Amino acid sequence: MLAWLYGSPTRPPIFLRLRSSKTFIIVVVASAVFTDVFAYGIVVPVFPFALTERADIPEDQVQPWISIFLAVYGAALLVASPLCGWMADRMKSRQMSFLLGLLALGGSTALLCAGRSIGEFAAGRVLQGVSAAVVWVTGLALLVDAVGPEEIGAAMGYVGLAMSLAVLLAPLLGGVVFAEAGYYAVYAMAFGLIVMDLVLRLAMIERKVAKQWLPDLDVPESLEKTESNQVNGAQEGQSCAKAVDGLEAQCVARADSGPPSLMERQPSNAAEAAVPLNAPTAIQSIVAKLPPMVFLFGSRRILAALFATTMQSSLLTSFDAILPLFVKNTFQWDSIGAGLVFLPVVLASFLGPVVGTLADKYGPRWLATAGFILSCPFLILLRLVEESSINHKVMLCAFLAFIGIGLTLALVPLMAEMSYAVDAKAKRRPPGFFGKNGAYAQAYGLFNMVRQLLGVFWCRCTDFNVQAWAAGSMIGPLLAGLVVEARGWGTAVLILGCVSIVTALPTAIWTGGSILKSKRSHKADVVDSAEGNGALSPA
């Protein structure tokens, strides 16, 4: 019945080429990110009302409960991110987990809308955290599958743009709609976006699936290698079964071909590939049970990308703890002004696609490094903003704009760097080292988990007293807030500037591969070339 929509062995789906195009998949993933962040932020203005009027929470207990619910969201996201990555790399189709994530988002929105008890609100936040994990892990892995590591930077730029727009629009629209149309109208907007997102996710066709009807469709090299390995295995007529306990791979060949030698047999997973053939069985048994995600921690390049990402997130989210209160005390701005002061930072995200394209072409190292270096002086110059005058207000907005440009220069290449690093690591390993679908989803599971620890998801709260984040996501904002409380605004922004310049050092050394190793390799090539020329020269 749905053959026209999803196709059959003899009939391709309708609009197949459009639905499997790189542009459409980028639109779908960007829309999913926008919907997820929008649904998270749109409830911020209405949640205090829901707690007091619907859950009968006393006014003096609203702040602690908001913090608890956001902590529940953060805990769910933290736990679900690596699990989603592990599952997405093992499922035949990433689209199914992508749809399950939207189902979780719909369930969470329904619970938050209709909830009248603490338990219902907590369950809604848990499902919201799971949905966010699916979107950020599976969605980014889908992007890599579609465009490949060579073009992932530009694609990440559009994702970052969608996220920034949702962060800006969600609380503003939520507050206005709640004031003008009431409680349920706010959630009606969220449900409308979810329905639109559902249509897009159902319409999308993964490129590796579409290739069975479109042989000329270009797919990333990693996917082509996977398909080639499967075809070669089928042509050889071998069926392999691995005994997990003993790690013995038995290949049953046809009568006209002998069993493969130890050198010919390819490892069936990352664990087996990581262990030498003559290694003790006990070590093999232990390592075999480790997921490929564990091996990613052995890469200094990936660890450097995770560190730089957490520092970028910390710098950005620190403003959520200190900037609204600063403009309230210094300029006497209301909640709308406190929300709009983030506009210069958010507008810089429109440069994301351009920055991503440059990262694809020239590499992420110097773009990300330049971003941290550029942010440093303007973070420190925020110390000059001290009084409520036009000049100081203009200075604040100008400094924030340059900081936004710097953080965008850092964020987009670092998001793409995860796929660059995994691709480089996979090329140095035997086929099948990271499993059938590679380790992109697991890498972005780590990416999402680490960003959550320092607060990638932030809220622009319309109440100055509501500055709460999920459990484990308060380090950056909390430290900045404590410094402002103890030493003032000037000391806080000075520390942020120092953090930015310090982060530039490991970013320059390891992003895009170790610069020290590349210099040694280049020096060795020069020496070899010189020796070769000397050997050829007449005596």
Image (cartoon, grey):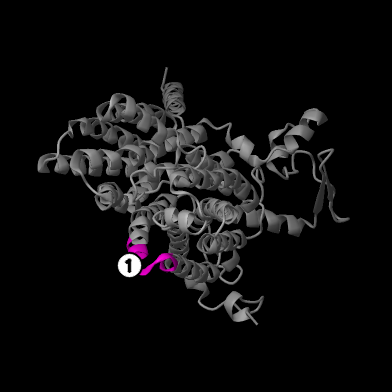
Q: Which residue is mark 1?
A: 180
In the image, is 22 to the left or to the right of 396?
Answer: right
Which of 474/352 is in front?
474
Which of 534/205 is in front?
205
Q: Is residue 124 magenta?
A: no
Position of 166 relative to 364 (above/below): below
Crowdedness of circle 1 by 10 Å Cα count: few (<14), some, many (20+)? few
Q: In the displayed image of the protein, which residue is found farthest to the top?
A: 539
Position of 377 relative to 156 (above/below): above
Residue 34 visible in rendering: yes
Image spot of residue 461 (x, y percent)? 36, 49
Q: In the displayed image of the protein, which residue is found farthest to the bottom?
A: 1
Q: Which residues are magenta?
A: 176-186
- Rendering quarter of residue 274: top right
- Rendering quarter of residue 128: bottom right
Image spot of residue 252 (x, y percent)? 85, 51
Instruction: Name the residue at 27% across, 53% down.
Output: 336
